[in-house]
Amino acid sequence: MLSKSRIGTICFYVTDIDRTERFYRDVIGLDVQRLEDDGSPWLMAAIENNVELIFFKAECRPGNSPIIVFDLPEGGIDDLVAGLAEKGATIVTPVSHAPGGWSSEFADPDGHVISMYQSETKPRKRG
């Protein structure tokens, strides 16, 4: 199901957006962009191989961050999530709005959250 996708994003939950921006910009040396969605600021920094690091202010505790995000190259997130559920995967977050598209999360057998993202420029359903 995800064999043709690539890791497009690694998502971090952080307690302080400003501190995180300074660290990744001034200490690590990344080109950090400050963006906003629904009035909430978030950060994005691109690294090699078209992988993005994104940072959202949220409860940050060991085990809930970072989250690996697979970028779906052909869309069809609704069908993919339905197929995962049919095969017994635990859907943690159903398909919902994300900055610039849609996302959904599921858990592996050990409870690790894996996310999928689909740009709004791609069709939500295959078929």
Image (cartoon, rainbow, N blue to C red):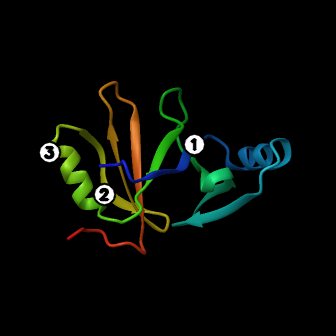
Q: Are marks 3 and 2 in contact (CB under 8 Å)?
A: no
> Quick one: label 2, few (<14), some, or many (20+) residues within 10 Å?
some
Q: Position of residue 109 (x, y in %)?
A: 29, 27
Q: Secondary structure at mark 2?
A: strand
Q: Earlier in the sequence, mark 3 or mark 2?
A: 3
Disc 3 residue type (three-letter): Glu
Helix, strand or loop at disc 3?
A: helix
Q: Residue at x 32, y 73 (%)?
A: 123
What amino acid does circle 2 point to?
Val
Report, in whole angstroms, how far the alpha carbon at label 3 lies from the one at label 2. 15 Å
Number of marks drawn: 3
* Local secondary structure at mark 1: strand
Q: Position of residue 26 (x, y in %)?
A: 85, 47
| Label 1 or label 2, whichever comes before in sequence order | 1
- The three-letter code of the residue at mark 1 reads Phe
Furthest residue to the front?
4
> Could you give the CA–CA distance between mark 3 and mark 1, rounded to whole angstroms?
29 Å
Disc 1 designates what residue? 12
Which residue is rendered at x = 68% and y = 49% of the image?
17
Q: Are marks 1 and 2 in contact (CB under 8 Å)?
A: no
**Residue at the far right in the pictured view:** 26
> CA separation, marks 1 and 2?
19 Å
- Viewer-proximal residue, 124 or 50? 50
| Residue to which mark 3 is pinned | 86
Answer left or right for 68 relative to 88. right
- Residue 95 locus on image (x, y percent): 31, 57
Name the residue carrying label 2: 95
Residue for point 53% across, 26% down: 62
- Residues 41 and 52: in front is 52
State the image quarter where residue 114 is shown. Answer: top left
Q: Nearer the viewer, residue 70 or 54?
A: 70
